[in-house]
Amino acid sequence: METVDLEDIGLSPLPNQGVDFKVLLTSRDRHVCTMMGVEGNLILHVGLLIDSEAQRLFWQFVETSDHELHKIGEDIVRKCCGLPIAIKTMACTLRDKRKDALSHLEHHDIDNVVSKVFKTSYDNLQDEETESTFLLCGLFPDDFNIPTEELVKYGWGLKFFKKVYTIGEARIRLNTCIERLIHTNLLLESDDVRCVKMHNLVRSFVLGMYYEVGHASIVNHGNTLEFHADDTNDSCKRLSLTCKSMSEFSRELKFPNLTILKLIDGDKSLRFPQDFYKEMGKLQVISYDKMKYPLLPSSPEYFANLRVFHLHQCSLRMFDCSCIGNLSSPEVLSFADSDIDR
């Protein structure tokens, strides 16, 4: 957790102007407010919606003239336990799919209803490309502006898009997937038109799905995502780590079935073991974002399946990048916003 000076973001009183202003901050963690020195009587707890508020929110997104839906709408809202994101997601899902909606929420308490709502929405997608795009967004950190162009590259590298033969076609296909995910409230629009966002609760659901299928074992450790080394390494297919404050990778980590490796925010102290890539022969995508010393591929024999190599805002001045030229398989190579001499 970092301290932010309000003057750094332009919130400072105008001298001799007599101008007062108020700042409204929201957080899921009350401790954040306490750490900022906010007085207890100024910390407002926003609880669950009461029934009338919940019903009003639900019918904002569903046709009120639909008599069939009216019969079950009130029960659906009650099963969402007053949670706004559950109510809106269920309402968006019901615009297209309504059969068995109520039964999907039966016998679930408030702790489980949100994941059940997201699971219902996910199952109703019934499109492999859209489902894959949704799961891919879960590999980005909480509250992250997810660049759609980055999703295009990852989707291309992982061969998500069927009967697509150019990056332009892949971009069009991805935009179609994103539009549907936003329509069902599984993704959110961002202030940056080049990005989308994923609600933290939705992301928790996605990570839970990764755990269930064994494709990734990711734990949220403070502000850092770290891989939990256990006997699931052989089944791990996707690995995303925020490397801030990490000093090294364990030599015991081996991922023979890994298809995408995504590392973010590694500083100069981060060290990679020798032959780090040796047991990653199935890698199709390598993505380094804001890494001070990214590990460049030095042995081409480990990268026969690599299709995308992405270096974004990385420091490359200290490296001889000629080794990348020895790779024969990559179809997308990006050095976007990286420091590089030649």
Image (tube, rainbow, N blue to C red):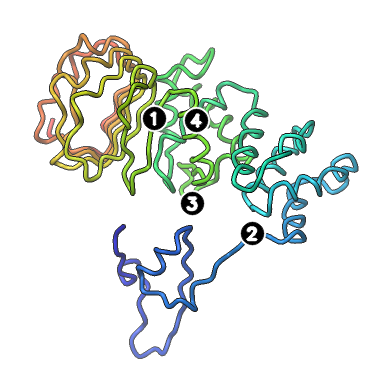
Question: Quarter holding the C terminus?
Answer: top left
Q: Report the Cα–Cα distance between label 3 and label 1.
A: 31 Å
Q: Secondary structure at mark 3?
A: loop
Q: Which residue is mark 3?
A: 191
Please report whichever mark, 2 or 1, sits nearer to the chain's N-terminal start. Answer: 2
Callout 1 crowding tier (Cα within 10 Å): few <14, some 14–19, many ≥20: many
Q: Is residue 284 above or below residue 4?
A: above
Mark 3 in CB contact with mark 1 (< 8 angstroms):
no
Q: Residue 217 got which mark?
A: 1
Please report whichever mark, 3 or 2, sits nearer to the chain's N-terminal start. Answer: 2
Residue 331 seen in this snapshot = no
Between tags 2 and 4, which lies in front? 2
Q: Secondary structure at mark 2?
A: loop
Callout 3 crowding tier (Cα within 10 Å): few <14, some 14–19, many ≥20: few
Between tags 3 and 4, which lies in front? 4
Q: Position of residue 209 (x, y in %)?
A: 51, 30
Q: Secondary structure at mark 1?
A: loop
Q: Is residue 212 above or below residue 81?
A: above
Q: Which residue is mark 2?
A: 48
